[in-house]
Amino acid sequence: MPSPSVARALHPGAWWLWAIGMAAAVSMTTNPLLLLIAVAVLTLVVVSRRTSTPWARAFRLYGWLGVFIVVLRLVLHVLVGLKWGEHTLVALPTVTLPSWASGIDVLGTVRLEGLLAAGFEGLRLATMILCIGAANALANPKRLLAALPGALHEIGAAVVVAITVAPQLAESVQRVVRARRLRGDGVGGLKAFRRVAMPVLQDTLDRSLMLASAMDSRGYGRRADATPGQRALTSTLTLVGLMATSVGLYGLLDTTAPRWLGVPLLVGGLGLGAVGIVVGSRTVRRTVYRPDPWRAPELLTIVCGVVAAAALVATARTSPDGLSMPLQPLGPPPLPLMATLGLLVGALPAVLTPEPPTHRERAAR
């Protein structure tokens, strides 16, 4: 058995489950202190455990996407948002739209409380996007496809092609910018954007199509003969399990929902989904070359994500005021101890997991 200190890539499923736990935790709060702690935790884990692969460089793109989301949310609030609060920031004129858009006023007096609420909602969405970016930067999408159950292989192939667009976009930007520098093209600003955008998009689409063709030629997603009864049973179990899981998650995250709508329905939905996956996997024949192992670091990573989500759920049920910033009256954001410790536990994979292998170590294997 290899030592835990030996450098190796963690199972991609563990990174995704950890990121889902962090995203579930973030979705329950608009407290800026907790959101900034979550951003720091995600950045620390990505910087500590990412490799030099193309998809690992996509985390910065997700960060800029988060900044864009926050700015867009603030701009939309100034343009058409509901202005509320006591502290006036800017007194802009109100433009009333025609009767076909009655009830919507453009601009108007911008107030501090409403602007802060819009910014924190944007920050929450941006942090959730960053959770997806962290999983995308840490998990090898090709290894994730190989680890998926047979029943999810066709869906997984489509998802893998989709999520590799962002990493390939980052690599294409670097290649095009490097080529422009070699040609002595030093034009910047909007002119440079127009010259870079089209080659980058074309290169990204070409590489995604090449990946899809390569996966298809190697037999990814090929389905063996299955009877109509097996297909109907698999579809029914998977669909009912997915619907029950979605409703169960809603009941778990909504503190006002009945208790029977949360954990019982979530567990039942996951059970039906697992049965559907097992039945559907019997109709897919494939081989797996050097499967990624599940060891203690993978389990610890998942536990850290679950602890972060559970801490926020417990805080929402015991002291829900700690998950939001007081805006009426305006006051400093609280720092609930349980939620803070839960998010900090999410940073433990940065030190509890083995270091990723370098190019030299991979080449030596």
Image (spheres, rainbow, N blue to C red):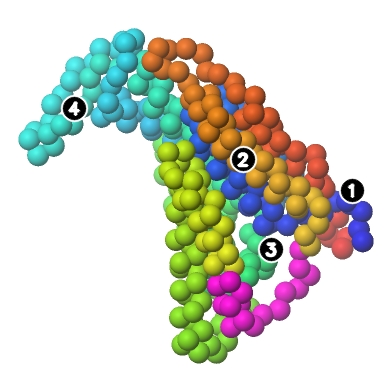
From the image, tell me which residue sits under label 4: 105
| Quadrant into which the N terminus falls | bottom right
Callout 2 environment at 10 Å: few (<14), some (14 to 19), or many (20+)? many
User: Mark 4 near mark 3, Cβ–Cβ under 8 Å?
Assistant: no
Query: Closer to us: mark 2 or mark 1?
Result: 2
Tell which residue pokes out farthest to the left in this image: 99
- As measured in the structure, the alpha-carbon distance from the residue carrying label 1 to the one carrying label 3 is 21 Å
| Quadrant into which the C terminus falls | bottom right
Callout 4 environment at 10 Å: few (<14), some (14 to 19), or many (20+)? some
User: Mark 2 near mark 1, Cβ–Cβ under 8 Å?
Assistant: no
- As measured in the structure, the alpha-carbon distance from the residue carrying label 2 to the one carrying label 1 is 29 Å
- Count of marks placed on residues: 4
Q: Secondary structure under badge 2?
A: helix
Above or below for 54 versus 269 = above
Earlier-in-chain disc, 4 versus 2: 4
From the image, tell me which residue sits under label 1: 5
Residue at left 39%, top 27%?
118
Q: Main secondary structure of the magenta part?
A: loop
Instruction: From the viewer's side, name the closer residue of 57 and 272.
Output: 272
User: Mark 4 near mark 2, Cβ–Cβ under 8 Å?
Assistant: no
**Disc 1 residue type?**
Ser
From the image, tell me which residue sits under label 2: 310
Magenta stretch?
A: 275-292
- As measured in the structure, the alpha-carbon distance from the residue carrying label 1 to the one carrying label 4 is 61 Å
Residue at left 32%, top 15%?
85
Above or below for 210 versus 175 = below
x, y percentage for residue 347?
71, 36
Write down the quadrant of residue 72 in the picture.
top left
**Disc 3 residue type?**
Arg
